[in-house]
Image (tube, rainbow, N blue to C red):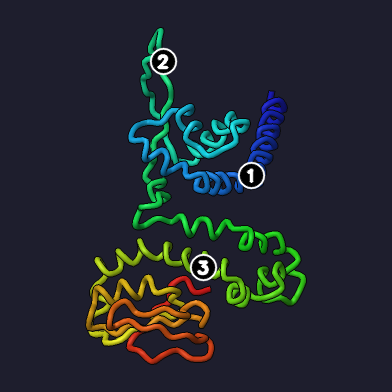
Amino acid sequence: MEKCSSDEQGKELLLQSQAHIWNHLFNFINSMSLKCAIELDIPDIVNNHGRPMTLSELVAALPINPSKSHCVYRLMRILVHSGFFTKEKVSKNGEDEEEEQGGYLLTPPSRFLLKDEPFSVTPFLLAMLDPTLTKPWHFVSEWFKNHDPTPFDTAHGRPLWDYAGHEPRMNHFFNEAMASDSRLVTSVLVKDCKAIFEGLNSLVDVGGGTGTVAKAIAEAFPNLECTVLDLPHVVADLQGSCKNLTYVGGDMFEAIPSADAVLLKVIK
């Protein structure tokens, strides 16, 4: 009896171990399905529908090849499981009888994926899942064996910032990503953390990108002189939208403009 119990526990452990590996192995499906939903405008389509949207209604609204229509259900099943959509029973009056179907609705997280959402994280999501930034993950093991400073160098043959300086597309989507990632935390910062700015006359945001954070601070505290320091190609042609905001192109490892406070956000 004890032997049978031990055998059963051993089999269960083997299955759990395999399932654990599979869960990690296929985790990328969740993020890539989310990227697909964004590129097909599914969050906005469902939101604009104004009521629970059935699968047939969604398929009809999507800009897809009709031969792929039967695959939309599988995509939505993943997104529902991931918590980005929910299903609610809706009643549809057919010609003969009432038919109950599941209708898709947004969840609180998916509202941050809408185009007109002020705190939309869509630019950040699309940037982080762009092949340019996912490719280095395929070179991590090779990077451990060589002398390159980062896996990005190994994958692309040059540092990320040098690459962005010569590739306008990446420079644009990376800056947009950093800006979208900053809006929500900045709104909380200037509203609920005002005390940390008391007594300051000047502030420099090091690696401040296109100035999303510094602009919000400058507007909230008009007597605070704010400076954005970033690489020349990042701040090229940018001008302060308010009198107390300026941009400086430079390298933080060489020199940082003098100020009462230095702001560092997500510096890697």
Q: CA distance from mark 2 to mark 3?
A: 48 Å
Query: Which is closer to the viewer, label 2 or label 3?
Result: 3
Which structural element holds mark 1?
A: loop
The label on residue 26 is 1
Secondary structure at badge 3 equals helix
Q: Residue at x 52, y 79 (%)?
A: 233
What residue is shown with label 3?
A: 172
Q: Residue at x 35, y 89 (%)?
A: 259
- First along the sequence among labels 2 and 1: 1
Q: Residue at x 42, y 78 (%)?
A: 238
Callout 3 crowding tier (Cα within 10 Å): few <14, some 14–19, many ≥20: few
In this rendering, position of residue 146 left or right of residue 105: right
Task: Decide: is 100 above or below 225.
Answer: above
Checking the image for residue 124, the label placed there is none
- What is the three-letter code of the residue carrying label 1? Phe
Label 1 environment density (alpha carbons within 10 Å; few <14, some 14–19, many ≥20): few
- Report x, y in % for residue 32: 58, 48
Tag 1–tag 3 contact (CB < 8 Å)? no
Q: Secondary structure at mark 2?
A: strand
- Give the residue type that dot 2 points to: Glu
Q: Is 79 or 131 nearer to us in this picture?
A: 131
User: How far, Cα to Cα, is label 2 from label 1?
Assistant: 35 Å
Residue 63 vertical position relative to residue 127 in the rendered view, above or below: above
* Residue topped by disc 2: 99
Give the quadrant of the N terminus.
top right
From the image, state whether disc 2 or disc 1 is nearer to you.
2
On the image, the x and y values in percent for residue 96 come to: 41, 7
Q: Report how far apart the C-alphas of labels 1 and 3 lie in the structure.
A: 30 Å
Tell me, yes or no, whether the two marked residues, 2 and 3, touch with CB atoms within 8 Å: no
